[in-house]
Image (cartoon, rainbow, N blue to C red):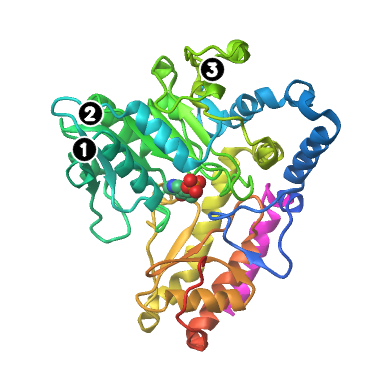
Amino acid sequence: MEKEKSLQKAIALDQADPLAGFRQRFYIPENTIYVDGNSLGLLSKDAERSLHRVLNEWKTLGIKGWLDAERPWFHFAEEIGEMAAGLVGAEKNELIFTGTTTVNIHSLISTFYKPAGKRTKILADELNFPSDIYALEGQIRMRGLDPASELLLVKSVDGKTLDEEAIINMMTDEIALVWLPSVLFASGQLLDIERLTKEARQRDIPIGFDCSHSAGAIPHHFSQWGVDFATFCSYKYLNGGPGCSAFLYINKKHFDKTPGTPGWFGYVKEKQFDMLLDFEHAQSAGGWQISSPGILGSSTMEGSLRIINDAGIENIREKSLKLTSFFLELLQPLLDEKSYALSVATPKEPMRRGGHIALSHPTEALRITEALKANGIVPDFRAPDIIRIAPVALYNSFEEVWKVANILKEIMERKEYEKFGNQRKAIS
Ligand SMILES: *Cc1c(COP(=O)(O)O)cnc(C)c1O
C-alpha cells in the first residue's frame, strides 16, 4: 500500500515538473536508470549537433574555420565562457573554457600561491579529490618547499563531511592560499562558499574553489561573493562528454596578475599572431589559456550549455533538491531498519547538499552497487563505503528515483548483493 502511494506521488511530481520535457533532448542508455551524471553526464542531441557541425566545418573550411566557422574557433573559448558565465555568477571576461581541471589547478595555484615571510602554507581539506591534492603538493615542491609542512589539510570528524568553522579556524596568518571543493565528491556535502570566501578575504588570503561537482547543478555567485579564482570540469553535470575542456574563473581584480603557466593562447588576441617573444597576456580570464583549444572534443559544450540555459540553473537546482529530497524520504524506512546498516553520508539540510546522495554501508557498498547495476541502474561506488546516486534534473524523473529506492529495498531485503564478488573493476 505504502509502495503504491509513493508511486502515485512520484507520478504526480513528474506531471507537475516544468523540466520534464528536457529528458527528450538526451540519449538515455537503453533499459537503464542512469543516476551517474555526477561522474559522466549524458549526451544530448543538442551537443551531438554542435559536434557534427564543427566536424563538418573542419571538413569544408580547413584552417579557415578559425575565423569563418559559425562560431569562429579562434573565439570559441571566450564565447563558451560567456555562455556559462550565468551559471557561476561570473562577470564579463571572468570565465574561460580552457584546459582540464587539474591543469587549471596548476595554472591557478602557480599564479596565486606567493609564499612569503610567515605566510607560506596552503590550506586545503582531507576530503578533496585526490588530483587536487597531488597538484597542490606539486606546486609546493616546485617552490622548493615541503608539502609535509606547507600543505595543511582540514580534518573531517566523521570521515564524510567538513565543518566550515574548523576551516575558518585554520585560516591563520601562516596561510598563503586556500583551495577547497564546492561539493565534496564522495559525500556530496555543499560547502558555504560565500561564508568561506568572506572569512578568507577578511584575512587577505586568496581563496579558490574546485566546482567540478556543483557546476551545472547548483548556481554560484563568484563575483558577488568575491571568490578569487576557480575551475570546474564540464563532463559531470555540464554534460560536455568525456575529457571535454574545463572552465577557469579569474576575478577581474586579478586580471593584471601574471599567469603562472603562460602560453601563446593567453596572448592579447589582436596581437597573438604578431608572434612576439615578450609575453603580454589578455586582461581577462582568457589570459590564462595555454594552448590551442581542443575545438573538436569541446564543441559539444555549445549545445549542452544551450539546454542548461534554456532550463535555467535556478530551476535545475530546485528540481535537483526535490529529487534528492524525495529519494531521502523513500530511503527512510531502509535507514530505520538497523539490520541493513545503511546510512546517508550527505547532509540532510537541502542547503548543504550537492546534486547526489551518498549512501554508506560499512562492508557491502561495493556489492550493493554491483547488485544495483545488475538491476539496470547505473550508480557508482567510491571506496571504501560509498554508493553515489545522482538523480539529474535535466534527464532523470521522480519515477526513476522511486524505482531506484524500491530496487534497493529488495536488494537489502533479499541480501541480493551476496551473489556478487568483492572485486572492484578499474572504474566502478
Ligand atoms: C572530477 C573532478 C576532477 C577531475 O580532474 P580532471 O583533471 O578533469 O581529470 C578534479 N577535481 C574534482 C574536485 C573533481 O570533482
What is the quadrant of residue 301 in the picture? top right
Question: Where 30 sits versus 130, above or below?
Answer: below
Percent x, y of residue 160: 32, 59
Earlier along the polypeptide chain: callout 3 or callout 2?
Answer: 2
Q: Which residue is mark 2?
A: 115
Q: Which residue is mark 1?
A: 145
Q: Secondary structure at mark 3?
A: loop
Secondary structure that dominates the magenta span: helix
Residue extending furthest toward the right: 60
Amino acid at circle 2: Pro
Q: Residue at x 29, y 52 (%)?
A: 126
Q: Is residue 321 within the magenta segment?
A: no
Residue span colored magenta: 1-21
Circles 3 and 2: CB atoms closer than 8 Å? no
Amino acid at circle 1: Leu
Q: Residue at x 34, y 47 (%)?
A: 133
Residue 76 is left or right of residue 67, and the answer is left
Q: Nearer the viewer, residue 384 or 220?
A: 384
Earlier along the polypeptide chain: callout 2 or callout 1?
Answer: 2
Q: Nearer the viewer, residue 248 or 163?
A: 248
Q: Which residue is mark 3?
A: 267
As measured in the structure, the alpha-carbon distance from the residue carrying label 2 to the one carrying label 1 is 9 Å
Q: Residue at x 80, y 29 (%)?
A: 62
Percent x, y of residue 349: 39, 53
Amino acid at circle 3: Tyr
Q: Residue at x 38, y 46 (%)?
A: 132
Q: Secondary structure at mark 2?
A: loop
